[in-house]
Image (cartoon, helix red, strand yellow):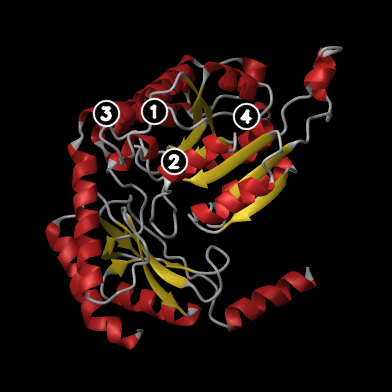
Amino acid sequence: MEKIKKALSLIKERGLYPDTPVVNSPHEPEIIVDGKKVLMFASNNYLGMLTDERVKRAAIKGIKKWGIGTGSSRMLTGNLEIHLELEKEIADLKNKEAALTFVTGYMVNEGCIPAIANVLDISALKYSLRVLGLKRRSTDTIVFSDEYNHASIISGVRLSGAKKEIYKHNDMDDLRRKLKKYSKRRRKLIVTDGVFSMDGDIVKLPDLAELAKRYNAMIYLDDAHATGILGNHGRGTEDYFNMEGSVDFVMGTFTKAFGGVGGYITGDKELIEYLKISSKSFIFTAPISPPVVCGLIESIRIIKKETWRRERLLDNAAYLRSNLKEMGFNIMKSETQIIPILIGDEKKAIQFENELMKNGILVPTVRWPAVGKGKARLRMAAMSEHSKEQLDYLLDVLEKIKNKFL
């Protein structure tokens, strides 16, 4: 405990401990922080579903019928019909055969990546089904992971125990070299984000898929920040590139575009059936809370119909990116609603964040270990409900104070 106290003290002394604000209202373009109105440019509530009255009414109906929890895991007490309905809705949106939901998106990656990388030993299954309870598994898989992948992917890969190769961010030449190095390996799995959560750029899926085909590799895509937003149908990264069906495993979360909480994975029916008996984070925990499930079902249906939401979001994001570039800010390679402003120095980034808050704007600082040391940045997130006036106010304030920090 003494070592923990010393580490904490050092972090605070260097001014790096996060001073997380207390928010007194739901995530909307304008929120209340410590009794003061501020503009929110930090939330993943991209399409306004978190506070949509129709979604809230559906959740209220859900709590009246089902209560606030489920009492146990689905493997022990069965499936609530609403969980099956939610899985049908998200599978339909993603244009996949089937889906499986988890209580968080983090748990999807922690449970599914190990289950896919370490397939139950087929030779042992021939002799006894008791192998389902043993640790005997195949170990011939190698995982190729983008260096900027989300922490949940990194955790899932580590838990798998599989041999791994980290390739440079979105660098298809580096991925090619690493795949070629293991060309004779029987099972290869490429794991990547669709939209990278700290940089706002999109995976080069056409090139990645071509490499996967050439070297006989599977693709696992984390589509958390793309689902509901990218593509002609809002299905995500595959839809964006007109490449539906090119990815073997597609997961995502309900925390972003859908305004709730939870995660899912989609794919072939056989995959989902397999994950039900092999993903520990599904087997050994309770599912998403029933009122949230009911709200999510309504949220997905609204997003399917009201395409103007993602169109307005992308317009708002493009407007911010264009103006920030013109003002001389380094927004890295952002091409989505996630827009970083690279500062570099951690202390300077925190000071920048504090100055924005003084001007009534909440934009968080992202620093190590979420990003590399010396690569601290302000991480802005646009929402469909941001007005032109709110966007312009943000830009005006950034223009006025930028010389203090850049």
> What is the C-alpha distance between the residues marked 3 and 2?
17 Å
CA gap, disc 4 and disc 2? 19 Å
Question: Which label's residue is closer to the chain start, 2 or 1?
Answer: 1
Q: Residues within 10 Å of mark 2 (few under 14, many from 20)?
A: many
| Contact (Cβ within 8 Å) of mark 2 with mark 1 | yes
Labels 3 & 2 near each other (Cβ < 8 A) = no
How many discs mark residues in the rendered view?
4
Is the Cβ of the residue at disc 3 closer than 8 Å to that at disc 1? no
Q: Amino acid at mark 4?
A: Phe
Q: Which type of secondary structure does the marked residue at label 3 adopt?
A: helix
Say which quarter of the image contains residue 270: top right
Query: Considering the numbered disc 1 on the image, is that residue within a helix, a strand or a loop?
Result: loop
Pick the residue in front: 187 or 134. Answer: 187
In this view, the residue in front, 287 or 33, is 287
Q: Position of residue 45 (x, y in %)?
A: 33, 47
What amino acid is labelled 2 in the image? Asp
- For label 2, the residue is 223
Is label 4 or label 2 in front? 2
Question: Which percent across, then down, holds residue 285?
Answer: 64, 31
Q: Is residue 384 visible?
A: no
Label 3 to label 1, Cα distance in Å? 11 Å
Q: Which residue is mark 4?
A: 282
Residue type, mark 3 in image = Lys
Residue 42 falls left or right of residue 194: left
Residue tagged 3 = 304
Label whose residue precedes the other's in the sequence (4 or 1):
1
How many neighbours does mark 4 have within 10 angstroms: few (below 14), some (14-19), or many (20 or more)?
A: many
In the image, residue 90 above or below residue 34? above
Pointer 1 residue: 94
Toward the viewer: 203 or 353? 203
